[in-house]
Image (cartoon, grey):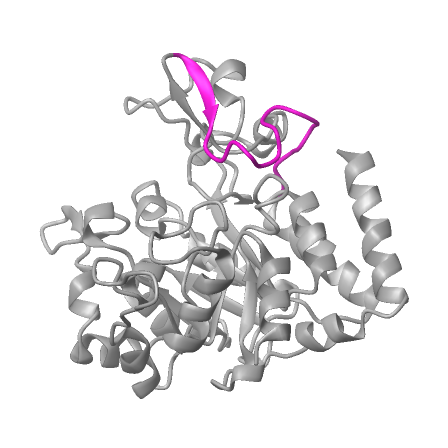
Amino acid sequence: MKKILYLLLLVVLFINLYGCKSNMEAANNTDMSNKNSEKIIIAHRGASGYLPEHTLESKALAYQMGVPYLEQDLAMSKDNHLIVIHDHYLDRVTDVAEKFPDRARKDGRYYVIDFTLDEIKSLNFMEGFTVKDGKKVQDYPNRFPMGKSTFKLHTFEEEIEFIQGLNKTTGKNVGLYVETKAPWFHKQEGKDISKATLEVLKKYGYTTKDSNVYFQTFDFPDLVYVREKLMVDMDMDLKTVMLFAENSWNETYEQQDDGSWRPFDFDKLRTPEGMALVAKFADGAGPSNDMVINGKLSKKGNIVITDFVKLAHDNNMVVHPYTVRKDKLPPYVDNVNELYEAILYQAGADGLFTDFPDLGLEFIKNHK
């Protein structure tokens, strides 16, 4: 891991010391308006199309590419550390099943919250995979080979110090785009992941809307709690984003008056009244690509736009859809640039998440 990381850092420093002016300008641009020249590219789990997602190596590569924001997904460990990982379980991207075969829950998953930081750091991290017929099958076969080289998980604090260190040595101001994973689940386990996240952000100087950070979540009840309770008590006022999911995903559960937990209804937020409600607590909206482009009606040469971006803009929210992948394109485009065009310029989104941030930055740079 160290050899790869040091090599990437040398690349970062070389490019930034010798003429990376355009990338620096892009990274320093945090304006929230909707002008074409201010579209932003968010590195989805780092440069995850090229290196395993959320590793520091992936973040270093995305940083070198010149992105204005790097994404951090967070889950809590048994001993209350914030771990940078997309899922709140470990088995999709690590060898946890081999190292700790008796630690799965009844559903067969190995949850971050059941392991200490030392145990988590003992795991080998790799490209995402699915187990089929007892064998690991890499989800994106043309990405970094699964199980090759050595990658490790790290904490939120370690990533902030890494990014702030690079900002200091390069003169950039690359920001954080933080997501708390399943706050409802952490609450069921007796942990307040949002409070822990805000405490770390405050520790490192991110306290106001001028701070170069977005705080996002799929958990609307928790977002209300963050805005009305936590940020008030902690004297913080960060930019916040409400993420939108399809109801069929069961992404978020909401506690009922009788104490039971039921799937949250996202559809009620995707109406004019719902979007106005979201805007009371959020500065931005994070829909899936299919929420801004009607995939059922769209065909090559005829992209059909939904009213999502307009509703959000009417309520003074920016829109940053997720996720553009050149190796998983919808049938209505022939290449990744057509998808960038459809989301950013036809649908009018203010930015987007992509696994291939270099391609997104290059597209915006050359757009006319």
Q: Quadrant of residue 333?
A: bottom left
The residue at the far left in this view is 258
Q: Is residue 102 magenta?
A: no
Q: Quadrant of residue 316?
A: bottom left
Residue range of the region highlighted in magenta in the rendering? 134-154
From the viewer's perspective, tell me whether residue 232 is left or right of residue 6: left
> On screen, 81 above or below 20?
above
In the rendered image, residue 57, in percent from the top left (x then y), is placed at 70, 44
Quadrant containing the N terminus is top right
Residue nearer the viewer, 243 or 256: 243
Magenta-colored segment: predominant secondary structure: loop
Residue 210 visible in the displayed image: yes
Q: In the image, what residue occupies the spot 51% across and 14% down?
A: 98
Residue 288 can be seen, yes or no: no
Q: Does residue 136 show up magenta in the picture?
A: yes
Quadrant containing the C terminus is: bottom right
> Horizontally, is 319 left or right of 24 in the view?
left
Q: Give the number of callouts.
A: 0
**Foreground pick, 346 / 285:** 346
Residue shown at 64% from the left, 66% from the top = 362
Tell me where residue 78 appears, x and y as whole percent: 48, 35
Determine whether, in the image, residue 101 is placed left or right of residue 332. right
Q: Residue at x 43, y 52 (%)?
A: 193
Residue 207 drawn at (x, y percent): 57, 74
Q: Residue drawn 21% across and 58% down?
A: 296
Point out residue 58 in the picture as x, y percentages from the top left corner.
65, 46
